[in-house]
Structures are given as structure tokens and as C-alpha cells.
Image (cartoon, helix red, strand yellow):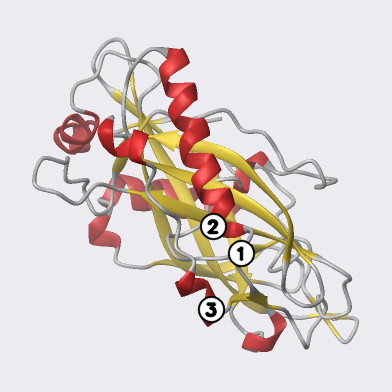
Amino acid sequence: MKRLMLGVILALAAMVVQASSSSDVEASAIVNGTLVVAQDGTVQAAVVDEPDKYGQPIVELVRRAVSQWRFQPVLRNGAPVVAKSTMHVRVVLSKKPDGNYTARIKGASFGDSDAPSTDAVHRAEINKKFPPKYPEAAIRGRVQGTVYLAMRLDRSGRVVDAAAEQVNLGNRGPDHLLKQFRDVLAESALKAARQWRFEIPTTGPLAAQESWTVHVPVNYALNDTNAPRPNSTWVSYIPGPYTPAPWVNKPDVNVADAVADGGVRTDGAGPVLLSTLDHG
């Protein structure tokens, strides 16, 4: 995967990663935008939302990659059409031994902007009654992180299977301790998720399915005055290992953590990317 040197954002990266000497530390941002897929699957146009948040080098990195992407043609009534899609692209900064930084596109997810809301899975209002509880052990250890959940839903919108596919931590420490805290956060997120409900698709190509797999991020962040204040765009963390949910036939590591905060990604929804993320 290609990497782009980003001398103009070294100051930002140094602030986010806090000059860590660990090669495991990453800083990343979800770059949001829209793209238009032509009838032949090529990208006709792409727009990055709020480009000033990311800086010109990051915006150019995303635009260059997106312009070379190729999707499976989007069909409506059996015929290919021009389709507008949302895009959420995770860009990762990594520190090199010489002190410079590289950037790469790690993942991306997409959604059909033209489809009615009834074509997609949505969170049910009742979920607000079952927020994940911040584990006491994590509070005492001042541990922060994000759990990326996969859930399988039945036709009533109930969660019948749930798995933590990845847990990224905002803390450094011995591997065995990081694993313990990943397990603690994952257990908390899964306990809440098993009580959640979702509104299932009633129209569109996904409506006839017997079940749906959705992916949701769960964030754990301390809010007191002693906690670190993460940059609203770039977040530093130690990435955890990716373990796909056991019921997923064709897991895609490229979209494991490419879900915007508060978002829900449904397997099979949106345009299907055929090329590699860094194609071109």
C-alpha cells in the first residue's frame, strides 16, 4: 500500500501521537464525503466534506485514491445506473524511525445516498435505555478506547449474535495488560449490545433477507479534567488485532473500523468496491 510523506502536518501528528517511540501507535481520522459511481463502476466525482479539518495533503491522498477506485455497477430494476454514495475513509498516520510520518488509507465504507431510509438498518430508540457501562477497572486504570462490534440481527431486529471484532486502546502498556483491558471493554460493549434492537429494512434489496450483520463502534472516553483531550479529528491509539465475527462468510478487514462515530454499517449495503483501497 502506498504511503505519502506528510511534512506539512508533522506538528499535528507529533501532538496527536505525543512523540511516541512505539511503532504500534497510530493516529487516524475518518474522512467523510460523497462520491458518484458511473454506470460502468468508475468514480465520476468525489467530494470530501470539511476538507480544512484534514489538511490539503490528506485530502489529496483521498481524492487521488478515490479517483482510481472501481465499483461493481449499481443496478436498479436490473439496469446499471449512476449512483451517489456516502463514503467514510479511515486515514492512518504512522511514525517512522527517522521521525517523519507516513499516511495510508486503511479502510473505507460506503452507503447509498439515493436509497430511501427504509432500505437500511437503523438503531431503535429503545437502545438509549441500554448504554454501555464504563467498566470500573477501566476507570481506575484510566483506560480509553473503541470497541468495534459486529451483530447479527433477526427479522424482528433483535441481536442474536454479537462479537467484538477489534478493540483499539488510547493507552500504552505491556501487551498482557492491554489484552486484559481490551477484554474488559469488549465485555462491557457486548453486554449492552445484546439488549439492543434495530429497525430492519422494509424496502430495497436487503429487505428479503432472513438476517443482517451490522457493525457499530462503541467509544469509551473519560470526561474528567485529568483525562486527555483527544483532537476532534485525529485520534491516537494502539490498534488491536482484528478477529472477524465467526458467522461472517467473507470478512473484510478494510472496513472493520471504517465506521463513523454513531454510525451503523450493514453488510451488503452500498456500492461494492472491486479495486484495492490504494489503487492508482
Q: Position of residue 157 (x, y in %)?
A: 72, 74
Q: Which mark is residue 195?
A: 1
| Residue 68 horizontal/vertical position (percent) | 60, 51
| Front-most of residues 172 and 98 | 172
| CA distance for labels 1 and 2 | 6 Å
Q: Quadrant of the N terminus?
A: top right
Separation of marks 2 and 3 at Cα, in angstroms: 12 Å
Look at the image and tell me in which quarter the C terminus lies.
top right
Residue at x 80%, y 47% (from the top left corner): 248
| Labels 1 and 2 touching (C-beta < 8 A) | yes
Q: Is residue 262 above or below residue 6?
A: below
Q: Which residue is under mark 2?
A: 192
Q: Using the rendered image of the protein, determine whether residue 106 is visible from the camera's viewpoint.
A: no
Q: Which mark is residue 89?
A: none
- Quadrant location of residue 21? top left
Residue 257 in sight in this render: yes
Relative to the observer, which residue lies in front, 156 or 233?
156
Tell me the kind of residue under disc 1: Gln
Q: Position of residue 43 (x, y in %)?
A: 61, 64
Eyeballing the image, is 35 above or below 103? below
Identify the residue at image location x=50%, y=46%: 188
Going by the numbered disc 3, the residue's amino acid type is Ile
| Gap between marks 1 and 3 measured at Cα | 9 Å
Crowd band around label 1 with a 10 angstrom C-alpha radius: few (<14), some (14–19), many (20+): some
Q: Please tell me how crowded label 2 is: few (under 14), some (14-19), or many (20+) other residues with Cα within 10 Å.
A: some
Residue of label 3: 126
Which of the marked residues, 2 or 3, is nearer the chain's N terminus?
Answer: 3
